[in-house]
Image (spheres, rainbow, N blue to C red):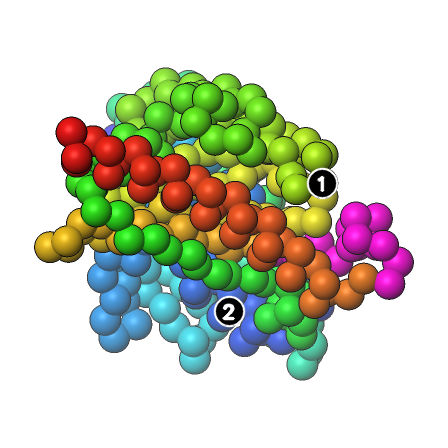
Amino acid sequence: MSDNQHTEHSVTVDAPARSVYDLVADVTRWPAFFAPTVHARVLEHRDGRERIQLWAYANGEVRTWTSRRELDPDRLRVDFRQEVSTPPVAAMGGQWRMEPLDEGRTRLVLTHDYRAVDDDPAGAEWIARAVDRNSESELAGVKRIAEEHARLDELLLTFEDEVEIAGAAPDVFDFLNRADEWPERLPHVDRLELREDVPGIQHMVMDTRTADGSVHTTTSVRVCFSPTGIVYKQTQVPKLMTAHTGEWRLDEGADGVRLTSRHTVLLKPSAIDGVLGAQATIADARSYVRTALGRNSLATMGLAKRYAEALTRG
């Protein structure tokens, strides 16, 4: 067995080290902040240690793995080690380190050590490309968000809509999962292309018609957890957004299913004038996005309700 390979990437961030640390430490927000990350779950958290599961792009493919992390806010570092890796990765770990340069500037360092399955050279080369590409993207994401930290609460929008359904969770899930049938089922969807090369990982291209009649094309990746829900991330977003992630969550009870739609949007301030006019504000953009996304989600949930309840009635 050969020694692990080691890499180091870094970037200078015009933000205090503690603000940078807080962004890295909160893995639940990575899908909105980091381009490669599709979904993140905290499986365990206790005394500064946590176990997480990530779904992320690696060289154009969505992979998943579980890792253990040690969070050290005093030393401004986060250590990580993959617990269950996905081939060609046999082992991987590393560290996020925040080095204060002064009160308002930080050198952010991201290191990795890794080994390929069977020390295969082709596997090692694949990992090296993925680590380089994702590290550069993640560091750029932290830099961008940290330097907007003063108005992050304005730019980040999270909201939910829900509906009660007197039906079965598998039927509701089937309606949401079969997105290839949405152009026939949903009036606001003009076109949808669906690809599912790996079971439970869906890639979508969708044309959506808005209230003013214009059509927006988005691309998304979805992770499907039958029959409890679907999470997704748009990889091509409308002009007003820097990022958009979402979730369809099904909670089954004695009387049926509660279907919840959750959206998290990171607004793009530079696009507001071009989309909403020169007088529009961030508050206007928040209201516009909330209304547009909520309208489409409620329409989808209403039709999912009708579909599942019809099946229940037989």
Q: CA distance from mark 2 to mark 1?
A: 42 Å
Q: Specify which label sits upstream in the sequence, 2 or 1.
A: 2
Q: Quadrant of residue 205?
A: top right
Q: Position of residue 194 (x, y in %)?
A: 45, 21
Which label number is shown at residue 212? 1
Which label number is shown at residue 182? none
Q: Is residue 88 visible?
A: no
Q: Is 93 placed left or right of 308 in the picture?
A: right
Numbered disc 1: secondary structure: loop
Q: Position of residue 211 (x, y in %)?
A: 66, 42
Residue type, mark 2 in image: Tyr
- Look at the image and tell me in which quarter the N terminus lies: top left
Q: CB atoms at circles 2 and 1 under 8 Å apart?
A: no
Q: Which residue is mark 2?
A: 21
Magenta-colored span: 266-279
Picture residue at 88% right of the left edge, 58% below the top: 278
Residue found at the far right of this picture: 278
Q: Is 73 placed left or right of 285 in the picture?
A: left
Around disc 1, counting alpha carbons within 10 Å, would you say few (fewer than 14), some (14 to 19), or many (20 or more)?
few
Numbered disc 2: secondary structure: helix
Please check the rendered image and state whether residue 93 is part of the magenta-colored stretch, yes or no. Answer: no
Residue type, mark 1 in image: Asp
Q: Position of residue 228 (x, y in %)?
A: 23, 44
